[in-house]
Structures are given as C-alpha cells and as structure tokens.
Image (spheres, rainbow, N blue to C red):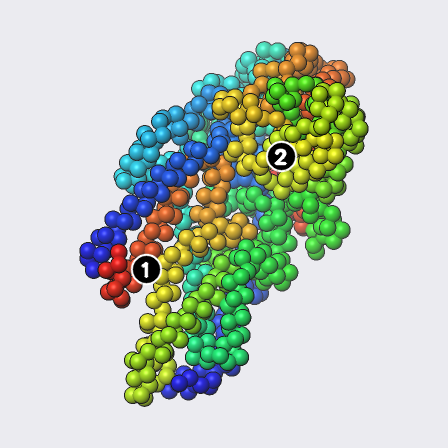
Amino acid sequence: MLFYLLKRIGLAVVIVVVAVVLLYSMIHIVPGDPASVILGPRATPEMKQELYELMGLDRPFVVQVVSFLGKVARGDLGMDFFSQRPVAQIVFKQLDETLVLVLASIGWAMLLGIPLGCYSAVFRNTFSDKLVGFFSIGVIAVPSFVVALYSLLLFAVTLKWLPAIGAGEPGQYLDQLQHLILPAFAIGLGWVGYIARLVRASMLEVLNENHIRRARAFGLPEHMIVFQYALKLAILPTITLLGTGIGRLISSAVFAEIVFARPGIGKLIFDSVVSRNYPLVMGAVLVSTVLFVLSTTISDSVNAMLDPRVRERL
Amino acid sequence: MSTPNMQFSKIRLSRRSFLKASAASAGWLMLPGLGMHPSWAQDIRILRVRDYGDPQSLDPGIASNLYEENVNAAVHNKLIAYKPGTKWAWQLEAAQSIEQTDPTHIKFVLKPGITFTNGFGEMTAEDVKFSYERIIDPELKSPIKGDWATLESVDVTDKYSGVIVLSKPFQALWMTTLPYMGGNIVSKKATLAAGGKFSAMPPCFSGPYVIKEREPKQRTILARNPEWKGEPAGFDEIHIFPIDDEKTAEMGFEAGDLDYTRISMSSYKNLKKKPPENSVVEKYPSLYYVWLGMNMEHPKLSDERVRRAVQYAVDIPSILEAAYDGVADPATGFVPPGLVGHRPDTLVPFKADFAKAKQLLTEAGYPDGIDLDLEVRNKAVYIAAGQVIQAVAAQAGIRMTMNLHDSGSFWSLGDESKGDRWKKLQLVLNRFSSAPDPHYAAQWFTKEQVGVWNWERFKNPEYNQLYEKALAEADKDKRDQMYRRMQELMEASGAYRFITHEAVPVIYTNRIVPALRPDGMPLLRYFTTA
C-alpha cells in the first residue's frame, strides 16, 4: 500500500508540472495584450513596458516557466501587481468560497442521491423506482446554469425567499447559508441524479451477492443488510466518481459564480484569463489543478485500500 | 428478496415515509430563507449599488477606470465636480471659488475646514498642488497624465488659495480634468508617508464617505465620514458590488438585493413597460461611441472607393433594431448630442444604399463583390451588431467573415507593438468610452495614435491641426465647428462608419433619489433617500 501511495504521489507531481507547462504555453500562444486590457487606452508605452517587466513577460519562455516552478516550490505564487497583493492570498480567499460551494453542492447531492439510489435498488422495478429513474435522468440532462437561472428567477426574483447575488455578510453564518442555498442547489441537482443512478446500479449488483443472501438467511435486519453491508461496497464507484468529479464541479461553479455574482476560484480564473492577468491565471489554475489531482489521488487511494486489485493495476 | 413495503427492525421504510422525509429535508434547507432576510432586506440606511468592475487601484493618481472613480469621487474631494442632472455642468466642491483669470491661469480658493481623516489635518492649497503636479510627474507614471498635459505648475498663494498655471490653453480642463479623475485631491502628508503612492486602501479620506471595508471581487463598503462637515452623507453605508453581467444585476435588483444598477439595453423596453414594484426605470444618453473601422493600409481597403462601398453597405437602423433593441440612437461621429462638436448629420445616410455600394465596388475593380474579415468582441450586443452588418453587407456583394475575440485578444488587434496582427486587420467593430468634452474622443484619431489606438491608420494633417487648435480655442462656437469638421474628415476618408452612442438604461428603487451624470453614471456621494 505504501509503495502504491508513493507511486500515486509521484504521478500527481508529474501531472501538476505538465499541467503548468502546458498552461504556460497556452497563455503565451493565445494572442492578447494584458497591458492594453488592464491599463486601458490611457496607458503610455512606458507604463506598458513596466507592466511587462513586472509580470516577467520580457524574459524568455523557459526562464518564465522555471522561475514560476521554483517560486511555487518555495510556496510563493507571485504577486498580483495591480492589487499589490500576493496571488496566494487572493486565490486562497476565493478558493474558500468555491470549496464551500462545491462541498455544499456535493453534500446535499449525496444526502439525497444515496438514499434515493438505495430506495430504487430495494424497490426495483416498482413505480417509485421508475419515478426516481425518470427524475435522475431528468436532472442529469439539465445543465447546471439552466437550473441556476430558473431557480434564481423562481426563488429569488419571483418568490423573494432567497437572495440572488453575493456570498453573504462575512461572519454572519445564517446569511451566508441563505446565499449558498441557490448556487448549491443549482450545482448539486445534476449530481443527485448521477449518484442515485450509480448507487442503484451498484446496490443491485451487491444485493445479489452471496454474502448478502447469507446475511438474509441468518435473519439480519434489512436496514443492517442495506446500509451496513451492501452500501459499504456499493458506495465505492461513487467515491471514485466524486474524486474525478471535482474538476467538473469547479467548472459548474464558474456558471453559478457568474449567475449569482459570487466570488470564487472559477470566476477568478475566468476574469483573469479575459484580462490576461497571467500571475493570477497561473496561481489559480495551479491551485485548482492541485485540488483536482489531490482529490483523485485520495479517491484512488481509498479505492486501493478497500480493493487490493486496484493497487496492482497502477 | 425485496418487497415494496419493507419492514426494518428500527426504521420503517416505505414510499410514504421516504417522501415525508424528503419533504422535511427540503423544508429544512429552505427554512432559513423564509421570512428572515438579514442582509438583503430593504434597509434604507444602506445603499446597495452595482458597478461593472472591481476597483484595483484607489490612488486617484493611478486609477483610470470609471468604477475606481466612482469610489474615489465619494471619498475624496475635487475643486469642482460634475453637477447631477440632465445637462453637463460643474459645481463647486472643495473650492469656495474658482475662476479662469486668463487662458493659462486658473485661480482657486479652498473652503476652509475640510479635513483629512486619520489625523492628517486640514486640506490646504499645498495638497492641491501636490495632487495635480504628481500626475504629471514621470516618476508616478500616471495613466491620466494626458488630462493634465498642459499643466505647468500649481502656485500656492496662501493656505487656501492657489493658481493653476498652464503652459498653453486647455479648454477640456473644465469638463474632463477638474471634475473627473484628475481632479481628486489627496493629502500630501499622508501620500508621502505611504511612499508616494498607494494602491488598495488610501491612507486617509476627505469626502463624505470613507472606505470601511474592501472584499476584492466581492464588495466595497463605504461608511459615513465622521469628520465630514459638509452636506451630510445620504446613507450610513454604501455597498458597491462588482457585477460584470448586467442581466445578473437585473435579477439582483428584482430580488431586492440592489437599490440601483445599470440594466441591459435589451431589458429596457420590458422593464420600462412593466417595472418591478417600487422601482423607476430611466434611460440616459451615453458618451460611448461605436463604429465600424477600416484599416486604410490593408491592400483590400487602400482604395477609398472600397471603403466608401462598405460605408454604404452598412444599414444603421437594422443594427440599432437588432442589436440595441431600438433603444439607442444613431451616431453622427464621436461626439454625442448635447456636447460641443456634435454633428447634426452624416455624409453617408444611415440607411444602406446597396446600388451605390455596388457601383463603388465595380469602379474599384470588384464587380463580383469582395471578401473581407470583420473583427468583433465576443459580447452578445457586438456579435448581434456584427451579424447584422455581415448579413446586410452581403446584399451589396461584400462578403464578411466574422472573427470573435475575447477582450484580451481584441484590444491588441491594431497595436503595432504587439506584432504584425495590425497588418491583417481589415474591418473592426469598435467601441470607445468618452468624457464630456470632444477633446477626449478626438485624441485617439491623430497621426500620433496610428498603430496605438488609431487602428484605421487615419492620417490627416488638417485633422491634426484642428485638434491642436481646438484644444486652445475658448470660443464655444468655433470649437464646435472645429470638432464637426474633424469628424467630417474622418467620415470622408471612408474609414469610419459611425453606428451609435448606445444608451444607459438604469433602474432604482423609489426609496432613493439617485444623483446621476447626464450620461447615467452614478455620483454616489450625492445619492439620498427619497
């Protein structure tokens, strides 16, 4: 297991480095001038030159990449020359907001999706099962930004039950929770369907296995069989899905952050790319890449821990 | 194995119980939202407004964006400021009196008793001198240096008085410099103590509001300045939310999260017809100008007849209807109505004339039409405008390929210092912001701006001469004629087809009285409760 973990971590580091190099190449290939966008038409050539130097854009490409990776190794993501604040400070502040949103989304999706999946499996081929199936496919098919827009129109604009924009007053948790409900609902709804379908399929497989039949024969209570024996095994594919799903969740978060005018790393990346604010782009993408690699590494490791065959496959 | 109504020893799981549990969970999730609205409830002591960007620099000497000025104007003072209303005018702010004693000298006297917060003392003429002279100091590299291009010095007469000395007359000073970004007065002592410039948070304030809190990308909170002795601020706090998307802001307003916001032109008619409860919808003329530019040095467009054919093939009414929902009016140049230099009409009629366009193309040697590239920024309104231009021009045999760019790519299309892309540039749908003096817009089309912001590469000696003359001309009528002629020269070159000045529709709750410039931009320090 230890060898597996070391290999997995080594692979994660390689993925991050490759991602950084690729990203660096891409942002330099894409045409665009950060100085013209950021400084506007009133920028003088001297100001533009100073900006390039500040951003390190006057140096050769390889030097820029190596310098960036060197800084990252020392825990320094650079400075955002405009706000004069460290990139790490800006990114982690936004990351908090995105993580809260992503965790809330996936949290409620699991809370609803797993019981729905179990219910469908236990009552399979009944009208309720078909209803859950119909609901699951329906919510998977609707893009999260559509859910975001309609939920905003219904619950915020028409009914005025929930706020429409922002992340709430800092320090006021009830207010922040209220601001979180609609975006988390929008992002999580599709995941309810995914999780319910996945859990159902896994549960059906597991419920037919010999040890479950044996447990029934021994007269164990049904809830114990479902939740303690069957679900424990049936949840594995869901853990893997969630691990790889972090990237998709962050992508969905971009839409939610734009529609609900929430701060977050997705919107930060979007704004930074549009304005060619390279230090912020690099910092934000690096952090989200690490997050993605970390979550897949953790989910793979959990899988490997529970199923030894996975360790041998890496 | 499984039954529809399974008996668990501890949990009785049935369809009904499952549905009950689900409903209870959903109710629990929604509970905090029902009837308890702490932050977005209407609290009239707090004004909540949307701005289109998040301030990056709050040093008035370095800031160059309108959303930065919106904050700076509320927390600092200027000698004179824009007067809220529908006609462009200025009013005294920090100055007790101000007068132009001759074309190059402006004498001012400050109101006594305006103090800087944080113990930085009373505002004096020394602070005015420092604030304006630092902008022309090459060391500061101020982006608004051009606003004070003719400033020679500010001579301090006594504690409250001084004279602004210009190297040559500069008429735009009264409408684009003193009441705008370049007019903010900072504390000399505080700024020097901060190292000569600051970025995120000013070291002190002198306006009716102070910056209480900055949450980058989230909001800026202004609070009453306890040391302010002028007309009391209208609100305890102003919360400014940076929201780029107008549609999002509209929904925020309708949900009760905002008190004032600019809205999209596409929403104006609907909202005007059926405004949300307790709200007012208004439309203001904008200073922006949108035009179709043509690169005069591109081989395909070097023949004036081809450029003029393009001018005649663009149908302005169709663009205004399709892209601007009939809310915006056509433009006759870069100067909007109501300002000195506005042209009443254009050389080329607003309506397209396909026969004329085809005739010009044939004369230029393109009897079968011509293929051209049109560069457009990827925002819905410009894409729609580009599509209309493309579709209508095709009727005259001008086949356009539309290329979309994000703003990062778009704003370097004609920049010579960014490589050779400018050489391939043919047609570009462009939009610039402006200020309430024609000088501001006119400066981008001089010979010196070729390859910088003059992407059409328009070089006209008469234009340059008039530009210099108009800067110094004190006679309003003569200035008016000069700027009209300059726009005529631009249009006559064939390189410009002016489209519109757009419009600024806004919405606000009837519990506030907004103070807006004639172009609909907010003057937050003058907002009050109804």
Give, as a three-letter code, the residue at label 2.
Answer: Thr
Mark 2 residue element: strand
Give, as a three-letter code, the residue at label 1.
Answer: Ser
- Residue B438 placement (x, y as % from top left): 68, 23
Name the one closer to the observer, A217 or B187.
A217
Using the image, determine if residue B443 lies above or below residue B377: above
Residue drawn at 49 percent across, 79 percent down: A125
Residue B231: image quadrant is top right
Q: Please report, as a chain letter, where disc 2 is located.
A: B
Q: Quadrant of the N terminus of chain B?
A: bottom left
Residue at which label 1 appears: A299
**Which disc is residue B108 wearing?**
none
Q: CA distance from mark 1 to mark 2?
A: 48 Å
- Residue B418 placement (x, y as % from top left): 49, 24
- Residue B187 placement (x, y as % from top left): 49, 27
Residue A54: image quadrant is top left
Report whether B526 appears left or right of A306.
right
Mark 1 residue element: helix
- Residue B440 placement (x, y as % from top left): 63, 23
Q: How many marks?
A: 2
Residue drawn at 57 percent across, 28 percent down: B181
* Residue B323 in sight from this viewpoint: yes
Residue at which label 2 appears: B401
Name the one closer to the observer, A144 or B41.
A144
Residue drawn at 45 percent across, 43 percent down: A269
Q: Using the rendered image, report if marks 1 and 2 lie on a common chain.
A: no
Name the one closer to the observer, B60 or A45.
A45
Report whether B117 appears left or right of B234.
left
Q: Which numbered mark, 1 or 2, is in the foreground of this view?
A: 2
